[in-house]
Image: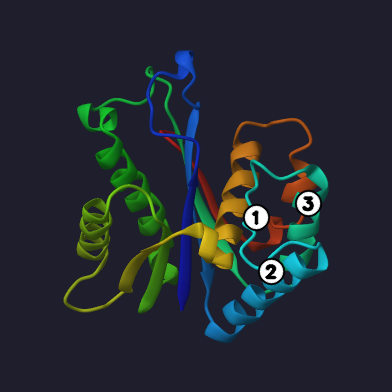
């Protein structure tokens, strides 16, 4: 089992001064390694079909409407599912000193999405978009395994940080998260993208409720 995690938005609290209204984290889950490999290969082939080099990075926010739809069409046939948590940073709803610190905010958001995914995880190998220092990556890995695993069951076998630029399936997680960020905010025409992935949705939560 392979899990790929990415985020959209930022952890800043000053939503009236440029920070995003939502911080969105998604986990994309492949139950079978073979399916993950096949999807990875299809993304690589898409780059070739579109005339891009093998190190081109698909990034939802930066890509054109045409490119977004090409990507979503390419990955739609593959067997994966996702869970997502969107945190509303409205100061009237989100309380707690810890949310003022980027690293603790990020840990909390990751914990929410992993707890949501817990019933579906078994010895999962997690890949996360590299965010911050190597020390923070190590601390985050230890934190996630600590809050998820117990003496009776290993939900998460490993957590590794990788650059999305060199991992096609982290680019897939970026796309899923980008689409869901648009849906959460009810942005114009979000359905044009969401229709490709809606059948793969296990959970989409807005927090605080």
Mark 2 or mark 3: name the one nearer the start of the chain: 2
Measured as percent of width and height from the top left, residue 110 is found at 36, 51
Left or right side of 100 for 51:
right
Determine the residue positioned at 70% across, 31% down. Answer: 187
Residue 207 in sight = yes
Q: Which residue is mark 1?
A: 58
Please give the label number shown on residue 34: none
Q: Secondary structure beneath disc 1?
A: loop
Q: Would you say the residues marked 2 and 1 are in contact, meaning their CB atoms lie under 8 Å apart? A: yes
Determine the residue positioned at 23% across, 60% down. Answer: 138
Q: Which residue is mark 3?
A: 67
On the image, which quarter does residue 144 sit in? bottom left
Residue 79 in sight = no
Left or right side of 142 for 124:
right
Q: What separation in Å lies between label 2 and label 1 (alpha carbons)? A: 9 Å
Measured as percent of width and height from the top left, residue 162 is found at 41, 63
Using the image as rendered, state which of residue 168 and residue 33 is in the foreground.
Answer: 168
The quadrant the C terminus occupies is top left
On the image, which quarter does residue 49 sit in? bottom right
Within 10 Å of disc 2 (Cα), the crowding (few <14, some 14-19, many 20+) is: many
Q: Would you say the residues marked 3 and 1 are in contact, meaning their CB atoms lie under 8 Å apart? A: yes
Determine the residue positioned at 46% across, 68% down. Answer: 3
Q: Secondary structure beneath disc 3?
A: helix
Left or right side of 107 for 170:
right
Q: Secondary structure beneath disc 2?
A: helix
Identify whether 91 is placed above or below 121. Answer: above
Using the image as rendered, state which of residue 67 and residue 166 is in the foreground.
Answer: 166
Identify whether 160 is placed above or below 178. Answer: below
Determine the residue positioned at 53% across, 83% down. Answer: 33
Measured as percent of width and height from the top left, residue 126 is found at 40, 68
């Amino acid at each position: 089992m392979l899990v790929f995690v990415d985020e959209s938005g930022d952890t800043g609290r000053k939503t009236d001064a440029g920070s995003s209204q939502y911080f969105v984290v998604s986990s994309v889950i492949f139950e079978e390694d073979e399916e993950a490999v096949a999807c990875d290969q299809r993304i690589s082939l898409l780059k070739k079909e579109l005339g891009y080099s093998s190190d081109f990075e698909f990034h939802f926010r930066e890509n054109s409407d045409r490119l977004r739809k090409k990507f979503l069409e390419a990955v739609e046939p593959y067997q994966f599912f996702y869970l997502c948590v969107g945190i509303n940073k409205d100061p009237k709803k989100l309380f707690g000193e810890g949310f003022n610190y980027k690293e603790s905010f990020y840990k909390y958001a990751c914990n929410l999405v992993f707890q949501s995914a817990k019933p579906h995880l078994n010895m999962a190998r997690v890949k996360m978009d590299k965010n911050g220092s190597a020390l923070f990556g190590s601390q985050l890995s230890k934190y996630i395994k600590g809050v998820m695993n117990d003496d009776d069951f290993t939900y998460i076998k490993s957590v590794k940080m990788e650059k999305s630029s060199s991992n096609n399936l982290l680019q897939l997680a970026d796309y899923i998260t980008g689409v869901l960020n648009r849906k959460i905010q009810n942005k114009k025409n979000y359905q044009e993208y969401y229709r490709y992935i809606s059948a793969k949705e296990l959970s989409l939560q807005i927090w605080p409720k």
